[in-house]
Image (cartoon, grey):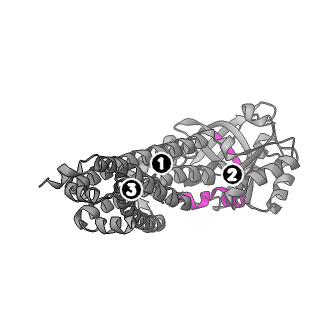
Amino acid sequence: MLTKIAWRNVWRNKGRSLVVIGSILVGIWALLFMVGFMNSFTISYINGAIQHEISHIQIHHPDFKKDFQIGYTIPKGLSIAESIPVEPGVEAVSPRSIATGMISSPRKANGVRIYGIYPELEKSVTHHDSLLVEGAYFGSGKRNPIVIGKELAEELKVNINSKVVLTFQDEENNLVSGAFRVTGLIETTSPTINKATAYVKMEDLNRIASIGDGIHEIALLLSNPENEPLILDKLKADHPNLLIESWRNLAPELELFLSMTDSFLWVLFGIIMVALIFGIINTMLMAVLERYRELGMLMAIGMNKGRVYVMIVIETIFLSLVGGPLGTLIGLVTMNWIGIHGIDLSAYSEGLREYGYSSILYPSIENSTYLYVTIGVVLTALIGALYPAYRAIQLDPTKALHMV
């Protein structure tokens, strides 16, 4: 009976009820949009770093990362790299030789990390061939080709076909150098690659460094990131003498960024829910004050205060059950649409690139988030109904019946 009365009471004043439903709907939509928008920044930043720079898993000599000595190559590195693609869940593998040195042009010099790569294998891991803004990805046929970031090229004041010189230490700690011809310029979301990284063919770098077929790094891109722990454990078991790390260890700042974003989203969730609580309290309190005579009459004819209290709470829950699913549905449609078409922030692309973000963001939300938001709104409405319901049962039926 109470449920039936509460449902009728909700629609007796349609304007007031629609205001509450609208506030719940807009609150849920705004929350879902903000969660999706923040997720798009997180996903863009982390995916950009994984796909264009660090990959999901890297393998090194245990001592190589201490000071990046060129002599610390992976024992039988090429054989290990060739055997890894047979592991299920591994999409692509790229072996690399690495040197740290200087890159110089006739006009300027700069510090640089030099990667010796197999272009066909490397592009399947980092997809740098799709990020070319000028030139070709090692396809020009020129001797000693090199691909660098566009910002580095601007710093050195070089263009396509310009000559640059790489200088670094060989295995015997002797300074060696080689002349290279710029064949391609790339532009990624990674400031490190854009400003301080150069890619050459492994055969060219290894010849100058006198390390033969030695490699320093094996980068793995996975087809399903969720399989990362299993693949990581298996690789560590198969190669216990090597340093094998996931992107979480390689770039702990990404893990920190992810946890900070999650914390911020919970804070945002709390702020919107608190605002929603006060909106519901305000509207339902007005509804109670307008119905003093009605509520007084109900208590005068025998409805006890407990049943009046429950009736007011049920009315608020009904409003949330109407507004909640509608807000979730509109939020779901919105997220699906902009998740496909993206949010174009090209006007801010230069600034976004400085911090490692793409200029087009694709908001996304986990399915469980929709459930959490809906439950959260219902609980918020329930909390928001407690005070108006309490005020309702504090009235004196005798005085309420004489109110105009």
For the residue pair 5 and 112, the one nearer the viewer reads as 5
Q: How many marks?
A: 3
Residue bearing the label numbered 3? 310
Where does residue 382 sit, x and y in percent of width and height? 41, 53
At label 3, which amino acid type do we have? Val
Crowd around label 1: few <14 · some 14–19 · many ≥20 (10 Å) = some
Q: Foreground mark, 2 or 1?
A: 2
Residue 56 image label: 2
Verify whether residue 107 appears in magenta.
Answer: no
Where does residue 388 sit, x and y in percent of width and height? 31, 49
Q: Quadrant of residue 267?
A: top left
Where does residue 100 sit, x and y in percent of width and height? 68, 37
Element on which disc 1 rests: helix
Label 3 near label 1: C-beta < 8 Å?
A: no
Element on which disc 3 rests: helix
Judge whether 231 appears above or below 110 on screen.
below
Q: Foreground mark, 2 or 3?
A: 3
Q: Foreground mark, 1 or 3?
A: 3
At label 1, which amino acid type do we have? Arg
For the residue pair 103 and 238, the one nearer the viewer reads as 238
Question: In 3D space, how far apart are the residues under numbered discs 1 and 3 (Cα atoms)?
Answer: 55 Å
Sequence order check, earlier mark of 2 and 3: 2
- Left or right: residue 340 versus residue 385 is right
At label 2, which amino acid type do we have? His
Magenta stretch bounds: 113-135
- Left or right: residue 137 versus residue 396 is right
Element on which disc 2 rests: loop
Verify whether residue 127 appears in magenta.
Answer: yes
Residue bearing the label numbered 1? 353
At a point 81% along the width and 60% down the height, the residue shown is: 87
